[in-house]
Image (cartoon, rainbow, N blue to C red):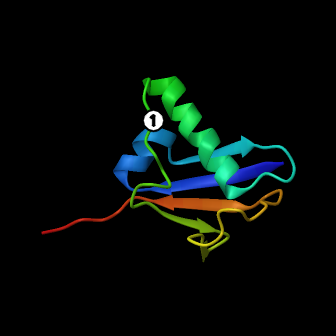
Amino acid sequence: MRIIIKTFGPEITGLIGRERVIDLNPSSTLDDLIRRLEEDIKTKYGWTQRIMDSNFMILINGRHAETLHDRILEDGDSVIILSPIGGG
């Protein structure tokens, strides 16, 4: 199945890219997707950013994913990852 990933914010966009499509096995969860992204980052840079342990906000089809880690993704789902915004 294909999952569409969009990122916003320089930190996460620099690691993953602005938009990409990931192919996952059927019955994959959000946690499976995040592990896959972290593996891709590690392969590319030699280290990984722990996405779920960071302050990134994750949305699945526009819904906050804070409690949806074990949600089974469906073909065509849209996952948005937002970097934290700071100011001063």
Q: Position of residue 26 (x, y in %)?
A: 87, 49
Instruction: State which quarter of the image contains the C terminus.
Output: bottom left
As displayed, is residue 68 above or below residue 54?
Answer: below
Residue 69: name its quadrant.
bottom right
Q: Secondary structure at mark 1?
A: loop
In the picture, measured across the screen, residue 69 lies left or right of residue 24, that is left
> What residue appears at the point 44 percent right and 47 percent down from the top-left corner?
13
Question: Who is closer to the viewer here, 66 or 77?
Answer: 66
In the picture, measured across the screen, residue 38 lies left or right of residue 8, that is right
Question: Who is closer to the viewer here, 56 or 79?
Answer: 56
How many marks can you see? 1
| Circle 1 crowding by C-alpha within 10 Å: few under 14, some 14–19, many from 20 | some
Q: Amino acid at mark 1?
A: Thr
> What residue appears at the point 74 percent right and 56 percent down from the top-left corner?
29
Residue 64: name its quadrant.
bottom right
Q: Position of residue 66 (x, y in %)?
A: 56, 71
Q: Position of residue 45 (x, y in %)?
A: 43, 26
Instruction: Name the residue tied to disc 1.
Output: 48
